[in-house]
Amino acid sequence: MSSNIQHRVLSIQSHVVHGHVGNKSAVFPMQVLGFEVDPINSVQFSNHTGYKQGFKGQVLNEKELAEVYSGLVDNDLHKLYTHLLTGYVGNPTFLREIANILKSLRAVNKKLVYGK
């Protein structure tokens, strides 16, 4: 499957159901600017972590991130990305997996733009 999209972003960031942080706040503005955005949610939380009663949700680990990304690679979709955007990363092993993804993306697109 080919794509005529000129700018495609892989965005690896957090996501909250209530509020606007991470991918929830990044995806729409980039779409308005004409970017196609494919989010990988590093966390799925009920709300941001600053609430008095805390938060509930799931955290994606580095193996799960690698698995999701490998699905993109298996289908040659990783070749479509012109940009990589990442947000807060609280785990060194997750960060190492992001570095692996960055290397993989740069191997197929030397002009890849990386924002963090």
Image: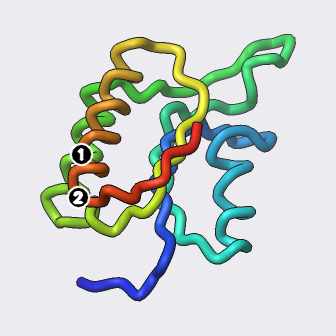
Q: Residue at x 13, y 58 (%)?
A: 74
Q: Position of residue 114 (x, y in %)?
A: 49, 46
Q: Position of residue 77 (x, y in %)?
A: 26, 65
Q: Residue at x 53, y 63 (%)?
A: 37
Element under disc 2: helix
Q: Amino acid at mark 2?
A: Val
Mark seen at residue 108: 2
Which picture quadrant has residue 64? top left
Mark seen at residue 104: 1
Residue 75 to residue 12: above or below: below
Q: Position of residue 40 (x, y in %)?
A: 45, 46
Residue 116 to residue 50: above or below: below
Q: Amino acid at mark 1?
A: Ser
Which picture quadrant has residue 22? top right
Q: Position of residue 93 (x, y in %)?
A: 34, 15
**95 or 103: nearer the viewer:** 103
User: Mark 2 to mark 1: distance in Å?
Assistant: 7 Å
Residue closest to the far left: 74
Q: Residue at x 41, y 88 (%)?
A: 4
Residue closest to the far front: 110
Which color scheme does this rendered protein use? rainbow
Residue 61 to residue 39: above or below: above
Left/right of residue 70 with respect to residue 98 in the rendered view: left
Q: Residue at x 64, y 58 (%)?
A: 27
How many residues crowd mark 2 within 10 Å: few (<14), some (14–19), many (20+)?
A: some
Q: Quadrant of the C terminus?
A: top right
Which picture quadrant has residue 1? bottom left
Tags 2 and 1 in contact by the CB under 8 Å rule? yes
